[in-house]
Image: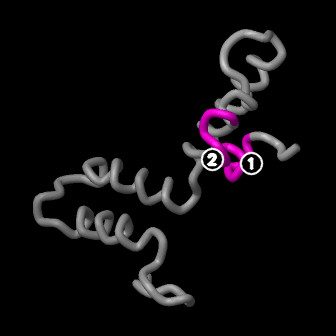
Amino acid sequence: MQPYSRFGGTRRCFYEFQLLVDCHTSADTKSKKQCLPKFEDYNECLHGLKEREKVRTLLNQLDENAKSGKGVTANELYKKENQVYENLNLIKKE
């Protein structure tokens, strides 16, 4: 993997890739299982599956709160935090 992107600077996940390669090529590594956490970090950086799942869970909880009338709703969060949630597309602009 080349360290530079098309737009200059380092690639998005190059640091995690370096840590993974370092783990695999280290003399201290006895098995590939030791490098599994670094592989998971690299995979999360590339694909963002855990982050998407957290956002999906948050959206489901906000929808349930809005339907039941209990708890915090997306509009209340928007009022408290200005445009943070709007920029993440968690609520629709009115």
Residue type (three-letter) at the residue carrying disc 2: Val
Looking at the rendered image, the disc whose residue lies closer to the viewer, 2 or 1, is: 2
Residue found at x 17% / y 54%: 30
Mark carried by residue 89: 1
Image spot of residue 6 (x, y percent): 56, 89
Mark carried by residue 84: 2
The residue lying furthest to the right in this view is 94
Q: Which residues are magenta?
A: 79-90
Location of the C terminus by quadrant is: top right
- In this rendering, position of residue 13 left or right of residue 33: right
Secondary element at image label 1: loop
What kind of colouring is applied to the model shown? one colour
Q: Nearer the viewer, residue 89 or 56?
A: 89
- In this rendering, position of residue 38 left or right of residue 85: left
Q: Is residue 2 above or below residue 86?
A: below
Residue type (three-letter) at the residue carrying disc 1: Asn
Q: Is residue 21 above or below residue 78?
A: below
Secondary element at image label 2: helix
Image spot of residue 78 (x, y percent): 69, 37
